[in-house]
Amino acid sequence: MDLVTSLLHAFPSTGEEWVDTLTGAPLRITVIIVLSFVGLYVANRLINRLTESIAEGRKRGPDFLSPLAAANPLNTARRAQRARTIGSVLRSSVALVIGAAAILMVLSEVGMNITPLIASAGVAGVALGFGAQSLVKDFLSGAFMLIEDQYGVGDIITVGSVTGTVEAIALRTTKVRDLDGTLWFIRNGEVLTVGNLTQGFSMTQVTIAVPAHQEVDEVRAALLAAGARVVSMDEFTDVITGETEVFGPETLDGKTVSFRVALKTSPAMQWAVARKLRGAIRQEFRDRSLTLA
């Protein structure tokens, strides 16, 4: 009987007490949970719309994401992967912040002192940061690499002793396929310096050697003519963006003299142009009765 009496006294006994109880902590907790889910849903929708618009090239986006829209519009895979990866990071960050805030507010409403909990979370965060600092370093490096557009899918890069084509980019690792077909997994936090061979523009450079007795002016004229022949090719109309430059004599010994021919091209087109340029130089030298060393 005492147990039943205690249970009855635990519940409100009047209508006014019931109203006070229901409009107190339970109502506030319900409002916190509902608002948290609504806020998370709205934030995710906005992030999805923003990243998809940027991935499809429909929208420039805010200033801190402007490198995404500045990427080559023809490189859809690269732009889409960068936009969606950053979108994933934003969604995870928003969910973490809203979830943590909602939990702390609910605990506060049920009467728990959250000050020690916050202090403990701070200590745990510091301990986790020390224990997983290499993982955190990889993620932060990957995020900044994506935002700064250091390289993207399809670019040819050099990282340390590895040179190859970027096949995939994640926050922790980058996959690079080298010329031998080997797929390299490179941790983003370990990338100290990276050379991008295909960003912005590229340079075709071909070095040739001729016998030392050849006339310098004749050799230069032949090289300029060979460059002009390549520039005039229909397949390179929108690829070569500058005039032919000839540098030399660059080296000189008792038997040979070397010259260097340079052409500015679109990204990743320097090798195709170089092949045509070598053929044009060979043909031009044959037509002018000049000799290659």
Image: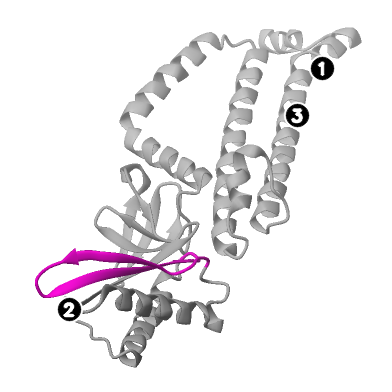
- Of residue 163 and residue 107, the one placed in the foreground of this image is 163
Which of the two marks, 1 or 3, is nearer to us in this view? 3
Which of the two marks, 2 or 3, is nearer to us in this view? 2
Residue drawn where x is 62% and y is 44% of the image: 66
Residue 224 lies, with reference to residue 265, above or below; the image says: below
Determine which residue is flagged by label 1. Answer: 22
- Which residues fall within the magenta stretch? 241-267
Q: Which mark, by number, is residue 213?
A: 2
| Quadrant in the picture for the N terminus | top right
Q: Give the residue type that dot 3 points to.
A: Leu
In the picture provided, is 196 more to the left or to the right than 152?
left
Determine which residue is flagged by label 3. Answer: 35
In the picture provided, is 17 more to the left or to the right than 226?
right
Q: Give the residue type that dot 1 points to.
A: Leu
Q: Which mark, by number, is residue 149?
A: none
- Element class at badge 3: helix
